[in-house]
Amino acid sequence: MARILVVGGSLGGLMAGNLLLRAGHDVTVLERSPRSLEGRGAGIVTHDTLRAALRGCGLAADGTLGVAVASRVLLAADGSTQATWAHPQILTSWGRLYALLRAALPPEHHRLGAQVQSVAQHAHGASVQLAGGETLHADLVVAADGIRSGLRAQLAPAVQPQYAGYVAWRGVCDEAALSRHTRQTLFEHFGFGLPDGEQMIGYPVAGSGDSTAPGARRWNFVWYRPAAAGAELQALLTDADGVHHPDGIAPQQVAWRCIADVRQAARAKLAPQFAEVLEKTAVPFLQPIYDLESPQLAFGRVALLGDAAFVARPHVGMGVSKAGDDAVALVAAIAAHGATPAALQAYAAERLPPGRAVVARARRLGRYIAAQQPGRTRPRSAAEQLQVVHETAIEASGVDLALEAEAVVPSGNS
Ligand SMILES: Cc1cc2nc3c(=O)[nH]c(=O)nc-3n(C[C@H](O)[C@H](O)[C@H](O)COP(=O)(O)OP(=O)(O)OC[C@H]3O[C@@H](n4cnc5c(N)ncnc54)[C@H](O)[C@@H]3O)c2cc1C
């Protein structure tokens, strides 16, 4: 049994913590937030590998995980159905996965309000320094502290997120608030709207109390819109009191004028069903889209996992699945090599190629939006529109990741 510290208690850290505990290790997940993260987040597409990782965490990971959809629908700007595609999937929510993974990890293995400031290593172990002065010792440290990982900043400061040139407006809308027409033509599907230069997607997720009963669900949307780096992005990340949040703006802080603008744009550009969803979503929020690739995942006794290691644009719907794959690979490497730097090297060798491939694939799927110039929007062809419907957030097993990796486009050339 090894002593292992996991820094970050979001979905990646909780999956790693649960899997390591079930593999017999003495693990503690350290989360800087003093409060549970419950009630945050929006929709998550599930994949086979995510369900396998969740089963490894002791969860049922069956149909009860979320809402099943049978097909995809592309709506034209006038609200008519332009295309459909039979493609069954289970859609869940960040909050549901968080609650399940928290419940599976005994409280003595999870600390809230534990902000890690730095990591140190010596011949036979590693230690982390918490804000407040406490030092914790371990055989291994797992950095699951997200896209702006402080441990990665310490170990590989040159690795930085690259802004992709567009943002995602997101939100969830109560099913009960929607008109019958929108419920009948959109709600039950994985839906797409493809105005020139932009991309709207969405799907049903569980509602309050994780209810998946018809009438009690919600519709989760993600609307990708170009926003040039500089003044345009800064305006979106500035709250109504004039405070700029360059590293991301919290949902409640998004300026009401920006929300009014995006609702107006929805009425002008999207099918009426999507405009209704925007209108009836209480708190639309936004996140800038980034690519992140760390060329190194193992640093002696410290390993990067999840978004600390790679962030792929959400078009692939792989953020949580990839973190689960990382956690599964890490546990297997420790089983094979012990809690040693060699285990982390083996983990890195296994996870670097798929990490690079999924970032490349996501970059390719987002390239059209990233390439838009103000006032010079290039329309998509009908074939390109169908490609979006067929390639967004599908099973990674249906994709030749090796080919994606070969086609890697350097950052910034999206
Ligand atoms: C609140 C929240 C909501 C999200 N909602 C969605 C969603 O709706 N849809 C989606 O696709 N993805 C969502 N994500 C992203 C998704 O969780 C990740 O893509 C996936 O889980 C893999 O990321 P991660 O767990 O490695 O990192 P993250 O999810 O980014 O989590 C990193 C965690 O580390 C903690 N942390 C950071 N620094 C420190 C430190 N120094 N000490 C201790 N703890 C630290 C953070 O507080 C955070 O909880 C959300 C993430 C968060 C944090």
Image (cartoon, rainbow, N blue to C red):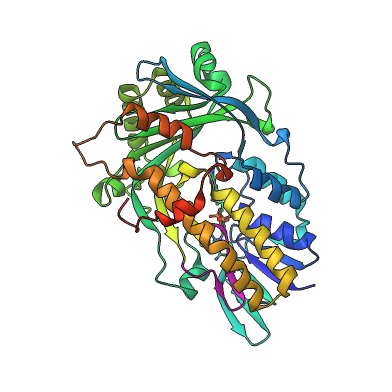
Give the extent of the magenta segment: 295-307
Instruction: Count the marks.
Output: 0
Task: Indicate the position of residue 170 as horizontal and vertical percent values.
Answer: 46, 37
Q: Is residue 5 above or below residue 242?
A: below
Percent x, y for residue 414? 32, 50
Decide: is 298 above or below 190.
below
- Residue drawn at 47 percent across, 33 percent down: 390
Which quadrant is the N terminus positioned in? Answer: bottom right
Q: Is residue 273 visible?
A: yes
373 vs 152, left or right, is left
Residue drawn at point x = 50 percent, y = 51 percent = 401
Query: Is residue 282 part of the magenta span, yes or no?
Result: no
Nearer to the camera, 299 or 364: 364
Q: Nearer the viewer, residue 40 or 143?
A: 143
Q: In the image, what residue occupies the spot 65% across and 47% down? A: 49
Residue located farthest toward the bottom when viewing the structure as drawn: 123
Q: Position of residue 167 (x, y in %)?
A: 37, 43
Quarter location, residue 44? top right
